[in-house]
Image (cartoon, coloured by chain):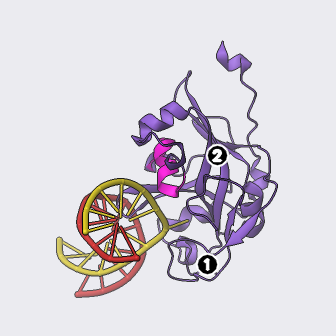
Chain colours: A purple, B yellow, C red
Amino acid sequence: MTTALRPTLRPLPRAFFARPTLEVAPTLLGALLVRRLDRNVQLVGRLVEVEAYLGPLDPASHAYRRTPRSAIMWGPPGIAYVYVSYGNHYCMNVVTEPEGTAGAVLLRALEPIEGIEEMRRLRGVQELKLLTSGPGRLTQAFAVDLSFNGADLTREGPLYLAEGTPPRRIASTPRIGIRRAADRPWRFIDPDSSYLSRSV
DNA sequence: GATGCGATTGCCT
DNA sequence: GGCAATCGCATCT
């Protein structure tokens, strides 16, 4: 049984996410995103790029205003917030801060670790560096759509975040693709990774 | 009920 | 580097 030979990927506990968003974001680098498609196929990627969205005090955050869509970010930490971007792509966040306070971290890029052929199939692309190097690409490679909005990422299951190995270095830059609060250096990357959505 | 837009991507020049 | 594709949601009327 291959599952018995596979090392256990231990979920990050809810308490990990129940901290200030700017503390959670850089410490998420190196963590593993795990997607179980079925009993035999598991996808794993190592986080190399994330962005912090702070909530009501952050004009770039969807939680700048509380709406039906953004209300989930006031809920329990460790929950997935998935939304549609430009009508063509899904973007995935993990909710941060204690319940009652809004915040989230956008997952922007992964290093493919396991299940690479399945990622290629899901993406319709062969080149390794194009599989998960962007927020819309990684959700497609991991078969994550709106049905995962609200999913608990702290429990072993179809989709969760697990302990990994922190990068040697961490760098921060302005966030990508936003207009408001575009100067805040709240994008965190592993600068030594070759799977970033863009360099620097 | 109608309108405008965006935390992107891929293809084109 | 420019730009079309495409749709859920926020924000009007």
> Does the segment drawn in magenta span residue A144?
yes
Tag 2: amino acid: Leu
> Does the segment drawn in magenta span residue A118?
no
Residue furthest to the top in view is A1
Q: Residue at x 53, y 77 (%)?
A: A65
Q: Which residues are magenta?
A: A133-145
Is A54 located above or below residue A32 in the figure? below
Quarter occupied by the C terminus of chain A? bottom right
Q: Is residue A178 left or right of residue A99?
A: left
Q: Are marks 1 and 2 on the same chain?
A: yes
Question: What SS does tag 2 mark?
Answer: loop
Q: Residue at x 47, y 66 (%)?
A: A68
> Mark 1 vs mark 2: which is more N-terminal?
1
Question: Image quadrant of residue A20?
Answer: bottom right
Residue A153 is tagged as 2
Is A189 located above or below residue A119 in the figure? below
Question: Image quadrant of residue A86?
Answer: bottom left
- Counting from the top left corner in percent of width and height, residue C9 is at 41, 67
What is the chain identity of the residue bearing mark 1?
Answer: A
Residue A91 appears anywhere in the view: no
Q: Residues within 10 Å of mark 1 (few under 14, many from 20)?
A: some
Q: Residue at x 80, y 59 (%)?
A: A169
* Residue pointed to by mark 1: A56
Is A137 located above or below residue A55 in the figure? above
Disc 1 to disc 2, C-alpha distance: 23 Å
- Counting from the top left corner in percent of width and height, residue A199 is at 61, 64
- Counting from the top left corner in percent of width and height, residue A121 is at 43, 34
Is A2 located above or below residue B9 in the figure? above
- Counting from the top left corner in percent of width and height, residue A147 is at 45, 46
Q: Is residue A131 left or right of residue A166?
A: left
